Amino acid sequence: MNAKTLDLKVYISEEKIKQTVERIGKELTTKFKGKKVVAVCVLKGSFLFFSDLIRQIDTDITCEFFGVSSYHGGTSSSGEVKVTLDLASPVEGQHVILVEDIVDTGLTMNYLRKAIESRSPASLTTVTLLEKPDALKVPCQLDYVGFKITNEFVVGYGLDYEGFYRNLPYIAQVQNLQ
Ligand code: IMP
């Protein structure tokens, strides 16, 4: 199946993303300088943000990958989080930075927080590039947020529609859904 042709409008430019990634990277460097951290990339959506962000964090860092799925390809969350890939190493006693692409209802982030906290890390810091505050269904503690956005569907820079559009270098609003 090919990608459905979407009518896209640039919402957050490459330049703005770059500035924000640098800002969060600096803040995390200040927080963790001299400490070893484990950065956890939430797959699939955060892989581009994650790879840009870790290059802005100046301290000893290892990387882990946590695969979850809650959308099953469409534009609304199923409300049910499915683990597609578990962490390969224990995080017990370590400083964990959890990197998400977007917090919509908050269910995925809440699930991930509980899953990591149950493994007894020394600390857990949550980061998301995007947050849709009007879509939140459960309270969600976010330590670093790149952009707060309106409750509309976006694609690009890792975020997909039916698996496509992750390779756009910017974040776009979709004009012609439904
Ligand atoms: P939540 O559990 O409802 O907060 O949803 C989080 C997940 O839904 C994210 O990790 C994304 O994979 C997906 N998601 C939420 N909003 C969007 C969007 O606007 N575009 C693409 N994916 C989204």
Image (tube, rainbow, N blue to C red):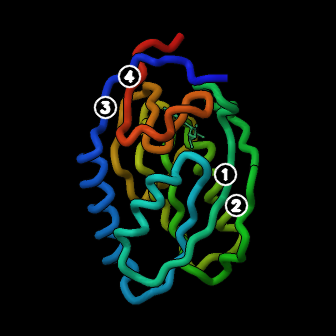
Q: CA distance from mark 3 to mark 4?
A: 9 Å
Q: Please name the residue that numbered disc 3 is placed on.
A: 11
Q: Is residue 146 left or right of residue 167?
A: left
Amino acid type indicated by mark 1: Tyr
- Say which of 51 and 108 sits in front: 51
Q: Are marks 1 and 2 in contact (CB under 8 Å)?
A: yes
Q: Amino acid at mark 3?
A: Tyr
Q: Secondary structure at mark 3?
A: strand
Task: Count neighbours of disc 1 (C-alpha within 10 A) and say few if under 14, some if 14 to 19, many if 20 or more.
Answer: some
Q: Which residue is mark 1?
A: 111
Residue 71: % across, % down: 65, 33
Q: In the rendered image, which quarter is residue 86 located in?
A: bottom right
Which of disc 4 and disc 1 is earlier in sequence? 4
Residue designated by label 2: 115
Q: Nearer the viewer, residue 155 or 150?
A: 155
Foreground label between 1 and 4: 4
Queried on whether the Cβ of the residue with tag 1 lies below 8 angstroms from ligand 1, the answer reads yes
